[in-house]
Each structure stands twice: as C-alpha cells, then as structure tokens.
Image (cartoon, rainbow, N blue to C red):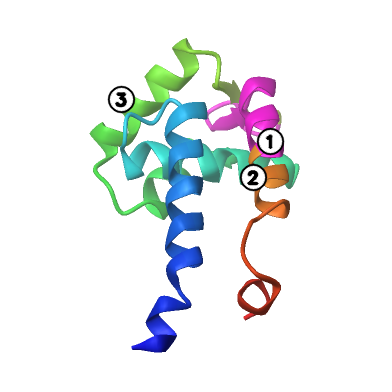
Amino acid sequence: MKEDVELVPVTQEFFRRRQWIDKHLPISHSTMALDVLVLAAHYTFAKEPISSKELFHTLAYSEAGVRKHLRRFVAGGWLKIVKDERDSRVRLIVAEQKLLNAMREYANMLLSSSLPPSLSRQ
C-alpha cells in the first residue's frame, strides 16, 4: 500500500534511535535494563528519586533480575543507591551524572529527528 511506503522514514528513525541506545547505554540489548535506567533518570530529573521497592513494583520483571541490573549500574557509575533522609530504611535509586548526560544527549538526538514534518506531528 502507498501509505505503508510513507512509513519507511518512521521505521528508519526507530532503528536509528535503537542503535543510539545500544551504543550509548549499558543495556546489553535488554529492555529490563533500559527500563531501569529510564525510570531512574525520570525520577531523578523530577527531583523525586524512586525507592528500590517502588522500582520493583513498577517494573513487570523479576526482583532478582532488576537487582542484578541495579548492581551492575551502580558498579559502572550509572546509578547510586542512597538512604532516604526521612526514613533510613528506604533506599532511593538516583541517576548519576553519567546517565543524566546520556539522557540529555538522547533528548538532543530526538529533537533533531529526521522524520518529515508531516509524520513527526502525528
């Protein structure tokens, strides 16, 4: 169909974005790892770090799998785990500058999208 041909730039852009993610974030092609990083960055940018408990309940993955990625990201300097000042039993997941910088770069890449204007506004 002719309409499907018009979507070729969309699929190309989608693939370009996935390549950027794979190159710049330590996700090893794992959507679980990507979700952990994106949520941590989101809540850090919002100035409301997510607790580890909230992270486990928000993501539809095994707690053991999420913990494995958390340990790897903390060791790699992408995330840190800090005590909540109001309740020392609560552990907060905070994005490190390394991740925040990568997310800013990704935002710039999105803003310079190569989609035709007619498709990027839909």
Place residue 11 in its image quadrant.
bottom left
Q: Quadrant of the C terminus?
A: bottom right
Q: Earlier in the sequence, mark 1 or mark 3?
A: 3
The one nearer the camera, 1 or 77, is: 1
Q: Residues within 10 Å of mark 2 (few under 14, many from 20)?
A: some
Q: Which mark is residue 105?
A: 1
The residue where tag 2 is placed is 43
Q: Secondary structure at mark 2?
A: helix
Q: Earlier in the sequence, mark 3 or mark 2?
A: 2
Q: Residues within 10 Å of mark 3 (few under 14, many from 20)?
A: few
The one nearer the camera, 121 or 30, is: 121
- Residues rendered magenta in the picture: 86-105
Q: State the residue at coordinates (43%, 40%).
A: 34
Q: State the residue at coordinates (64%, 21%).
A: 98
Q: Earlier in the sequence, mark 1 or mark 2?
A: 2
Residue 97, above or below 76: below
Q: Nearer the viewer, mark 1 or mark 2?
A: 1
Q: Is residue 100 magenta?
A: yes
Disc 1 from disc 3: Cα separation: 26 Å
Q: Amino acid at mark 1?
A: Glu
Q: Secondary structure at mark 1?
A: helix
Q: For residue 117, say whether it is visible.
A: yes
Disc 1 from disc 2: Cα separation: 18 Å
Whether residue 41 sits left or right of residue 20 in the image: it is right
Indicate the position of residue 105 as horizontal and vertical percent values. Answer: 68, 35
Q: Amino acid at mark 2?
A: Tyr
The residue where tag 3 is placed is 68
